[in-house]
């Protein structure tokens, strides 16, 4: 339970019964928590609008006006509220009632009459998970800032990761990948080159060919990036994409020489987006390639360096954008 020297976790209790609120408040304040009472759904939503977000919400189901399911749906739909864990309390015993509660977004379901020990244990578990997720979010923000700061110091790669993320998302949407896969691709686009912080700027900005040892150092960056992003333990797929975005479809890439569909589709998408932006951007060792050269390289190396299906989707996207640009120019 919270120590006296720590900031107390704040718990919003929503119940139309003053007696129930008083009982829960007695249990929770004795355990070291700060309690905020609300006696119906509208009052609770007003509390959320006016005050700092609580750390946890305990919500009764059977209330006049907005019932608990409706309140929970509104909380989970709120931009800044959806990460607040919600524990629903009810005297209803049917499994369908609990299913409805979870479908409305509840994180925990506890039946009345409430057992004090069970309540406190579940509250503690929900708060522990919330604070862990907040720590992971903070770690992600630090790593994102690091990735973008690396690029900001290099005129040749400035904006590269954001463009790769944008291209990757467009490809994913055209391939009808899931929302989760698309989010992974967006995040991997930002973070795919973060491992280059472990490589000397002398190597990264060398105007001529790399030596064998310098090439080995560059090829370490996916594995370094994976290690840097390890604090994001809830994002195992993201770590996999960061590690494998330099694999080749023919198995001749690095670091693990995966081939074909052994390479996660998210990494195959990032590989095409990454290559396109790299080829169309200036580098210390060459000027930007022309659009014709880049598209020719993508076509020629499909099934060798890149997944041919991903290349086809990307080429269709580029062709449509080019046709749209021409149409707009002709109209003007």
Image (cartoon, helix red, strand yellow):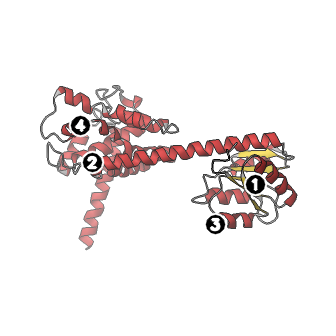
Residue matched to label 3: 49
Residue drawn at the location 53% of the way across and 44% of the way down: 135
Residue 203, image x, y percentages:
20, 36
Residue 317, image x, y percentages:
33, 52
Q: Residues within 10 Å of mark 3 (few under 14, many from 20)?
A: few
Farthest residue, direction left: 208
Q: Earlier along the polypeptide chain: callout 2 or callout 1?
A: 1
97 relative position to 83: left or right: right
Q: Earlier along the polypeptide chain: callout 1 or callout 3?
A: 3
Give the spatial CA distance, label 2 vs label 4: 22 Å
Residue 156, image x, y percentages:
22, 49
**Which of the two marks, 2 or 3, is nearer to us in this view?**
3
Residue matched to label 4: 200
Residue matched to label 2: 277
- Whether residue 311 is visible, yes or no, is no
> How many marks on residues?
4
Q: Secondary structure at mark 1?
A: strand
- Whether residue 219 is visible, yes or no, is yes
Q: Secondary structure at mark 3?
A: helix
């Amino acid at each position: 339970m919270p120590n006296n020297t720590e900031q107390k976790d704040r718990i919003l209790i929503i119940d139309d019964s003053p007696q129930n609120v008083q009982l829960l408040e007695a249990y929770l304040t004795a355990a070291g928590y700060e309690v905020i009472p609300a006696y119906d759904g509208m009052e609770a939503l007003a509390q959320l609008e006016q005050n700092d977000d609580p750390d946890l919400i305990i919500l009764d189901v059977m209330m006049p006006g907005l019932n608990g399911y409706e309140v929970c749906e509104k909380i989970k739909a709120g931009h800044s509220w959806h990460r607040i864990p919600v524990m629903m309390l009810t005297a209803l015993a049917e499994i369908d009632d609990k299913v409805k509660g979870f479908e409305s977004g509840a994180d925990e379901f506890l039946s009345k009459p409430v057992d004090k020990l069970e309540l406190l244990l579940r509250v503690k578990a929900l708060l522990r998970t919330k604070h862990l997720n907040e720590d992971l979010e903070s770690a992600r923000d630090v790593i994102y800032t690091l990735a973008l700061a690396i690029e900001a110091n290099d005129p040749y790669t400035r904006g590269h990761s954001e463009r790769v993320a944008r291209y990757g998302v467009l490809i994913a949407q055209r391939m009808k990948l899931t929302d989760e896969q698309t989010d992974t691709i967006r995040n991997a686009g930002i973070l795919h080159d973060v491992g280059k912080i472990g490589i000397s700027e002398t190597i990264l900005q060398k105007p001529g060919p790399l030596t064998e040892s310098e090439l080995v150092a560059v090829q370490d960056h996916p594995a370094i990036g994976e290690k840097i992003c390890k604090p994001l333990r809830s994002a195992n797929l993201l770590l996999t994409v960061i590690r494998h975005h330099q694999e080749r479809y023919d198995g001749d890439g690095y670091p693990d020489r995966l081939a074909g569909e052994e390479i996660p589709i998210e990494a195959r998408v990032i590989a095409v987006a990454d290559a396109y932006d790299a080829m169309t951007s200036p580098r210390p060792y060459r000027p930007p390639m022309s659009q014709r050269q880049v598209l020719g390289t993508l076509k020629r190396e499909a099934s060798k360096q890149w997944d041919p299906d991903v290349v086809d989707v990307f080429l269709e996207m580029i062709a449509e954008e080019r046709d749209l640009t021409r149409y707009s120019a002709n109209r003007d």
